[in-house]
Amino acid sequence: MIYDVIVVGSGFSAISVTCNLIEQLPASAMVAVVGDDPGFGRGTAYRTELYLHRLNVPAGRMSLKPHRPDDFVDWLKNRGRRLQSGDFASRSDYGLYVRDTLAQLLRRRDGRCRVDFIRAKAAGCVERYNSTLAFHLGNGDEIAGRNVVLCLGVGNANLPVDPTGVPLPMRSRIVENPWRLSWLRRVASSDTVCILGSGLTMIDQVLALRAHGHRGRIDVLSRRGLAPLGHARKPPSPLPIDVASLPGTISGILKSLREKSRLVDDWRGVMDGLRPVTQALWQRLSDMERARFLRHALPWWNIHRHRVAPDVFDRFAKLVSEGTVRFHAGFLKSLGAEKGRLLAGYRVRATHDFAGIRTDWLVNCTGMERAGISHSPLLKEMSRFQLIAADPLGLGIQVDANSEVVAPSGISPARLFAVGALTAGQFWEITAVPDIRVQAKAVVEEIIAQGAAPEA
């Protein structure tokens, strides 16, 4: 079957694009959504049921609909959640909101386009006649589309070192994907835990451990030993920032931002002022400066830009001050075992010294893998056909300012777009809901503007 639009993926980006297609396409249009994740639209982040796992963006900025900014807040109020627009809702509630929003659109019978949800993985692709791109599905079927939107997210990053040095009976105590929360039930209250990585996922897992009755020591090992900072309880007003007035180098930008932070009562005002202009700032940087940012400034950007809810931060800071959570800065070099416990060997940062952490459990919280071609058989095949090309810095695939894929061959049998993490090379900040929802709406408008959708 030939569809007007095929959406490939099953995470938040896919659901955001699908909602916009339903709202904007005529009744005569046909859409296929292809993905094999049973929790369609919720993804890893919004599937968790633990109440302590909060959004790190206030509820007032999490509407799925850019034209209705209070939509999520209204949804919360209608379900008895006593939260205001500046509060931080649970991720579970947000996942339910996303699901309900899609379900409400699908219940429409007046002029809604046809939407087929196909529970299968897009395993390969091939050019077809009539300006379409066809996909071979894991269930043996084949579909083709005149427009294709790639909404492929990323998975949990692999362990930094090979765990084969750990005896087989003990490998069950290495948690490679912490979002499979069943591992928490196996942790004894007095067990020691070593967490690799010190970002948002680490804080989530520390609080999940405490909620499940764990009271043992937690060691956190990361390259720089930095942890996310907290949102202010009374957020400062964002400081307007003129991108054109900023220098063109990372060092110059950093100097300018430090100067601005001295002029305000709270540095968060500077970071929040950067939020609406981050993509424009990124696009002004040369490839060399972007690479410098990724090598040297990214960890500091992450802890200041991607902050946690105030009460979550307070809970975590208390555990640190009590000594329950201890930080180590260094580079993991080996995994082994000693006297019935796991042994994580690491080189201490800024030295040639080596140290080891002996622990009962090792949890991989190094974050999500960077979007790219290598993690997806489909993308590798599309690259082989010269339909897509990798971003030079490994930040997804090459797209233009309209999120349309730049084909190395210069030709594509169908119009091909990407939304979300795959477009980080062009937009950088494109993994959070406020950014993705705008991008998704713009992509659908671009598809319609080119007359690709049939007339009503």
Image: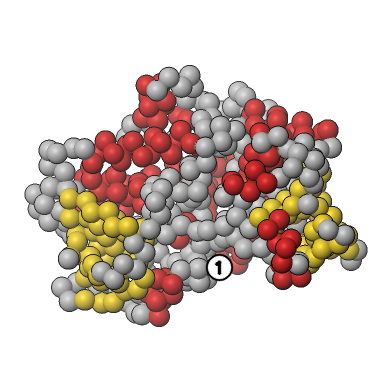
Residue at the spot 68% in from the left edge and 28% down from the top edge: 265
Q: State the residue lying farthest toward the right.
A: 353
Q: Quadrant of residue 125?
A: bottom left
Residue at the spot 38% in from the left edge and 74% down from the top edge: 382
Image height of 94 relative to 394, above or below: above
Residue 68 appears at what percent x and percent y?
A: 33, 31
Q: Is residue 218 left or right of residue 385?
A: right
Residue 421 appears at what percent x and percent y?
A: 47, 56
How are the residues colored? Answer: secondary structure
Residue at the spot 46% in from the left edge and 22% down from the top edge: 81
Could one spot residue 207 in this view of the protein? no
Image height of 76 relative to 62, above or below: above
Q: Quadrant of the N terminus?
A: bottom left
Q: Name the residue carrying label 1.
A: 393
Along the viewing direction, whichever of 379 and 213 lies nearer the viewer: 213
Residue at the spot 32% in from the left edge and 77% down from the top edge: 410
Q: Is residue 102 left or right of residue 186?
A: left
Residue 319 appears at what percent x and percent y?
A: 77, 34
Q: Is residue 338 left or right of residue 271?
A: right
Image height of 237 relative to 28, above or below: above
Residue 213 appears at what percent x and percent y?
A: 70, 34
Q: Type of residue at label 1?
A: Leu
Helix, strand or loop at mark 1: loop
